[in-house]
Amino acid sequence: MAIAAYLSYGAEDSAAARDIARELEAHGLPATLTAVDRAQAILDARCLVALISPGAEADEAAARDLAFAIANGKPIVPVLLKDVSAEGVRPVLDLQNRLDAREGLSNPVLSAIVARVRAFAEAGRTIAMLNIKGGVGKTVLAANVFAAAHLELGKSVCFIDLDPQHNLSQFFLPPEERNRVRADAMTIYSVFIAKGPLSTPRENFARMPVQLNRARGMGKQRFDLVVGDERLFEFTLDGRTERERADALSRFHDLVAQLRAKYDLVVIDVNPCATFLTRCAVTASDHIVAPVRPEKYSLTGLNMLEQVTRQIRGRPLKSSEFSVLLNGVADRPRTRGGYDVDQATREEIAAAPFFGSALLGPAIPYTTHLRTTPIDRYVVNPISLTAMKQFAQRMLKESLASAAIDIIKRAGA
Ligand SMILES: Nc1ncnc2c1ncn2[C@@H]1O[C@H](COP(=O)(O)OP(=O)(O)OP(=O)(O)O)[C@@H](O)[C@H]1O
Ligand SMILES: [Mg+2]
């Protein structure tokens, strides 16, 4: 199996770290104790086990490990060895999966560490639908490509609607149902708010998703949604303090970690442009899917996306962390001024240095089945609104399913 855990600790806790690594290895969970390239070792592991103590706090390399793991969406298992005072580790210690080892690394504590690491090693993958350019099909393809992943490939899927415009929630759910979820403080906004009646306690996060496939006899393969909320716009402007944002980021990562433990795929639909919400999505994701329209400006949008993501993650990126999905191609060549627009876009992206190898073979056709109409239509079972359940053309269903297969492979799901 791939590396299950990277252990981050201060020099004085190295004996404890070795005990934990030995226990993990004994349970078939390979762990990294030391590495020359610490950043790469963290990226290669499914989670980071952070041994928290005053010594670790004072250790600059251990502090860098934590910051890097947070910026790169690595799940963290905090193990509290001794009481600490610093603000810096507080958000990490707030995580649902924290463990108290102040009375020593007893067998129950070691078993709990093994269980937490195993859950992350076997957890689902997180995919962000992202492009700095608007209107390229992030939302409509989130719904339809991952409906294909669910219906054709049997994957359990949970969407998180992280766009204040919450089009994905509007696509699937009628206003009354969205209002009910909002009144129960169970929308994404209640994850971002840390205190007061509008906040959802972390222990309720796993209960937030609303079921979108309500067919009976579905087994345990779910197709669910954490409902969006326009009040998230507060986090796109500068109306919230740094502390409130830090709490929101930590709580959002906790939500994603809890969902990954239950679903094969956690799919985040993100707003266009680069805001704090983009940071939340990018730092929580293993893989980014960027839909692009066949047009002159598509490569500009992709280059912006690469820059924004690199800045957020604080490291050079690999093109294997992205999938570019051409969306809205014509079913027959669209010649304009002597050349085929779809083909020209494909060739331009394929020849580009970074995104060339991220471009998926399948492309999604332009079709009325994916066009949003001004009239809302709601049904008893929301998954029936996706093209996979409608009388859509076979070509559309096939392209959605092959895109899903490729994305899942690239995301390592
Ligand atoms: N392949 C397609 N065929 C027909 N219409 C499409 C297709 N893809 C997207 N659309 C339509 O284009 C519009 C924009 O799509 P969508 O809302 O998914 O984009 P977006 O990237 O999520 O936008 P935003 O940046 O505003 O979040 C919608 O009306 C959608 O129905
Ligand atoms: Mg959208």
Image: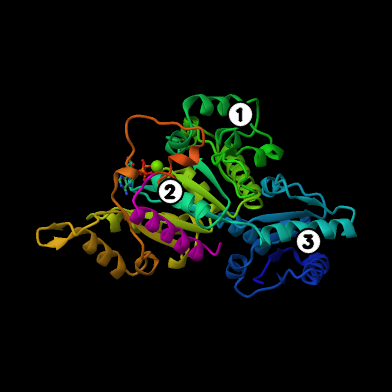
- SS for callout 2: loop
Could you tell me if residue 98 is visible in this image?
A: yes
Residue for point 34% across, 56% down? 395
Look at the magenta stretch and give its main secondary structure. Answer: helix
325 and 330: which one is in front? 330
Q: Which residues are magenta?
A: 391-413
Work out how far the residue at label 2 is from the one at label 3, CA to CA, in angstroms: 40 Å
Image quadrant where residue 400 sits: bottom left
Left or right placement of residue 218 versus residue 140 in this view: right
- Please name the residue that numbered disc 1 is placed on: 185
Identity of the amino acid at label 3? Val
Q: Answer with mark 1 or mark 3, whichever residue precedes in sequence.
A: 3
Name above or below for residue 306 compared with residue 277.
below
Where residue 327 sits: x, y (%)? Answer: 32, 53
- Please name the residue that numbered disc 3 is placed on: 114
Quadrant of the rendering where the C terminus is positioned: bottom right
Q: Answer with mark 2 or mark 3, whichever residue precedes in sequence.
A: 3
Where residue 389 sits: x, y (%)? Answer: 44, 45
Say if disc 1 is inside 8 Å of ligand 2.
no
- SS for callout 3: helix
Q: How is the image coloured?
A: rainbow
Label of residue 388 in the image: 2
Left or right placement of residue 377 versus residue 286 in this view: left
Where residue 336 sits: x, y (%)? Answer: 12, 57
Image quadrant where residue 402 sits: bottom left
Left or right placement of residue 276 versus residue 335 in this view: right
Residue contact between numbered discs 1 and 3, judged by CB atoms under 8 Å:
no
